[in-house]
Amino acid sequence: MNEQLRMLAEGEKESRGLVPLSLLALATGVGAGLVGALFRMTLESADRLRAEGLVWAHGHHLLGLAAAVLVCAAAAAAAACMVRCLSPHAAGSGIPHVEAVLRGLSAPAPLILLPVKFIGGVLAIGSGLALGREGPSVQMGASIANVIDRFVPLRPADSRVLLAAGAGAGLATAFNAPIAGAVFVLEELVQQFEHHIAIAALAASATAIVVARVLIGDAPDFNVVALPPASMPLETLFMVAGGVAGLLAIAYNRAILGAMAYADRLRIRPVWRAAAIGAGVGALAFFAPDLVGGGDPLTQSALSGKGDLVVLALIFLLRFGLGAVSYAAGTPGGLFAPMLTLGAQSGLMLGSLFQAVFPGAAIRPESFALVGMAAFFAGVVRAPLTGIVLVTEMTANTSLLLPMLGACFAAMLVPTLLGDEPIYDALRHLSMSRERDAKAKRAPPAAMRPSVAPEGVED
C-alpha cells in the first residue's frame, strides 16, 4: 500500500512538472526554428555568392583561379580559427557533443558556441566544403535550450530532456521535417521512449517548423515525380541495394575516421590544415562548381534519374572522398546532407544496373535513388526510423515505404554483423578521448605535484 502511494505521489509530481517543461519546449522550438531558418537562409545566400564569384573567376582565368583558391582557403581557415580560439565543441557536426552532454559525459558548451557555430558554419559550408547544415542546426538548437535552462533552472533530468528537444527542433528546421526531428530525439539522441521526452520533442519540433515555415516556406526540399509502389519481385532488389548501402556505409565511416586520424598525424596547425583543405575545394569549385557544397543539387539530380552511369560513379567517388576530407578540416558542419547525396547517387547507380540486367522488370532507377538515401543513412548512423521519416518528409513521397523498410533492414544488418560502430558513437568516443588527452597534457608532471603526507604523519 505504501509503495502504491509513493508511486502515485511521484507520478503526480512528474505530471505537475510536465506542464512547465512543455511550455519551455515550445519556447525552445521557437528559438531553434528562428535561428535554424536564418542559418538556412544565410547558407543559401552564401551559395549564391559563391556561384556569382565563380562566374567572375571564370572570366579572369588564372587570376580567377587564384582568387577562388584564396577566398575558399581564407573562409575555411577563419571558421577553424573561430572554433580553435572561441569554442572547440563547435567543430564538426556537434551531434556527438550533444549526445555526450545527454549521457552526462560532458558539460554543456558555453553560450559563445551559438555565434561560432552559426558564423563558422556559414563560412565553411559557404566556401564549398562538403558539409551539411543539420549538424550546426542541431547543436544550435541544443544551445538555445541551454540558454533557456540557465534562466529557468530545471531538474537535471528535465534539463536533458529540454536539451534533446532543442536538438530535435534544430534537425526539423534544417530539413523542413518536423516528424523526423522528434523521431531523431527518441531514436538517436536519448535512445529510449518516455512520454515526457516524446511530448517535449514533439512540442519543440512543431513550434520550430511553424516559425521556420514563415521564413522559408513549406515546400519539401526535393521535387520527386510520383513513383509507383514496388512490386513484390522488386522487393528483393531493394533489399540487395540496402546490403550494398551497408557496405558503402562501413567504408564511409572508416573514411571519415581515417581522414581525421591522418590529419592529426600530420601535426599541422588546425587553422593551416583547414586552409589547405579550403584551397583544394576552391580549386575544385573553379573547375567543377556543381560538385562542391552540401550536395543538394546533386541529390535532386539523382532523384530525377539524371546521369550517365560512368559519370555518376566518378562523381560518387569524388564526393565520397571530399566528404571525409571536409569533415577532417575541423570546421562547423554536419554529415547528413553529404550522406543523403551519396545514398541517392549510389541508389541511382544500382537502379540503372538493375534496369540494364532486368530490362523487362519495369525498374525506375530514381526509385532506387530515393530508397538509397534512407538505406545509406541507416547504415552510417544506425537510425533507420529517422532516415525513413526524414527522406519521406523531404521528398513528400510515401509510395516506397515498404522498400525503404527492407533496404534499411539490410543496410543495418551488414555493418552490425561486421562490427562497424555507428558514426556518431565513434565520433563521440574519439572526442572524449581527445578531451582526456588534452587534460593529461595540461596536468603538471608528477614530480611537480605537491605531495600529500599520509593522514596522521607530520612533515
Image (cartoon, rainbow, N blue to C red):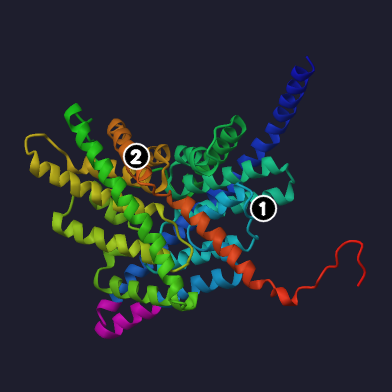
Q: Assign a secondary structure to mark 2.
A: helix
Q: Residue at x 31, y 36 (%)?
A: 404
In this rendering, position of residue 91 left or right of residue 12: left
In which quadrant is the N terminus drawn?
top right
Judge whether residue 70 is colored magenta: yes
Residue 323 is one of the magenta-drawn residues: no
Identify the residue at the far bottom of this view.
63
47 vs 300, left or right, is right
| Mark 2 surroundings within 10 Å by alpha-carbon count, few (fewer than 14), some (14 through 19), many (20 or more) | some
Which quarter of the picture shows residue 409?
top left
The answer to which of 178 and 11 lies nearer the viewer is 11
Report the span colored magenta: 57-71
Q: Residue at the far top: name it.
A: 1
Q: Quadrant of residue 287?
A: bottom left
- Identify which amino acid the numbered label 2 is placed on: Leu
Image height of 308 relative to 400, above or below:
below
Whether residue 220 can be seen here: no
